[in-house]
Image: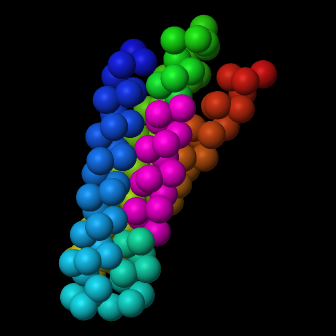
């Protein structure tokens, strides 16, 4: 399982950097400053949680708790829902996707809560 999370963390980091570079260099003159800020928020949370996934990948082999893998899956879900909805919203202007964003935020929060519980 730890190898799975290492692969997911590497993919999340790779895509986060790629999307960040695309936003910084390819979108500056193509979308409004407000939508660029939305996009950048998606990148920020994407990359933070890529690092969190990497940490969990390191913890899983040392921990007996099933909460660590669950936290990792919640971080992954959060990246897809939170960051993904912000990317699509910024690129397409479909603000209805803003309804999905809080679900991703809840997945992030649940993942962090599970890490805290697992630590105890």
**Percent x, y of residue 92:** 22, 77
Along the viewing direction, whichever of 113 and 27 lies nearer the viewer: 27
- Residue occupying image coordinates x 71% and y 32%: 116
The quarter of the displayed image where residue 12 is located: top left
Along the viewing direction, whichever of 95 and 39 lies nearer the viewer: 39
Q: Which residue sits furthest right?
A: 120
The quarter of the displayed image where residue 26 is located: bottom left
State yes or no: residue 48 in magenta.
yes
Question: How would you classify the magenta stretch by its main secondary structure?
Answer: helix
Q: Is residue 33 left or right of residue 115?
A: left
- In the image, the segment drawn in magenta is 41-55
Along the viewing direction, whichever of 110 and 23 lies nearer the viewer: 23
- Residue occupying image coordinates x 36% and y 46%: 13
Residue 112, visible in the rendered structure: yes
- Residue occupying image coordinates x 36% and y 83%: 35
Q: Is residue 71 left or right of residue 112?
A: left
Q: Is residue 89 above or below residue 43?
A: below
**Percent x, y of residue 54:** 47, 34
Q: Is residue 40 above or below residue 45?
A: below
């Amino acid at each position: 399982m730890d190898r799975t999370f290492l692969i997911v963390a590497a993919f999340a980091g790779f895509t986060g950097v790629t999307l960040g570079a695309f936003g910084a260099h390819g979108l500056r003159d193509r979308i409004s400053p407000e939508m660029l800020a939305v996009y950048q928020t998606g990148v920020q949370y994407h990359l933070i949680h890529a690092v969190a996934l990497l940490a969990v990948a390191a913890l899983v082999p040392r921990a007996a708790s099933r909460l660590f893998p669950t936290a990792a899956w919640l971080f992954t879900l959060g990246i897809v829902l939170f960051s993904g909805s912000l990317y699509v919203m910024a690129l397409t202007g479909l603000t209805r996707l803003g309804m999905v964003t809080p679900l991703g935020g809840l997945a992030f929060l649940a993942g962090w809560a599970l890490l805290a519980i697992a630590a105890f």
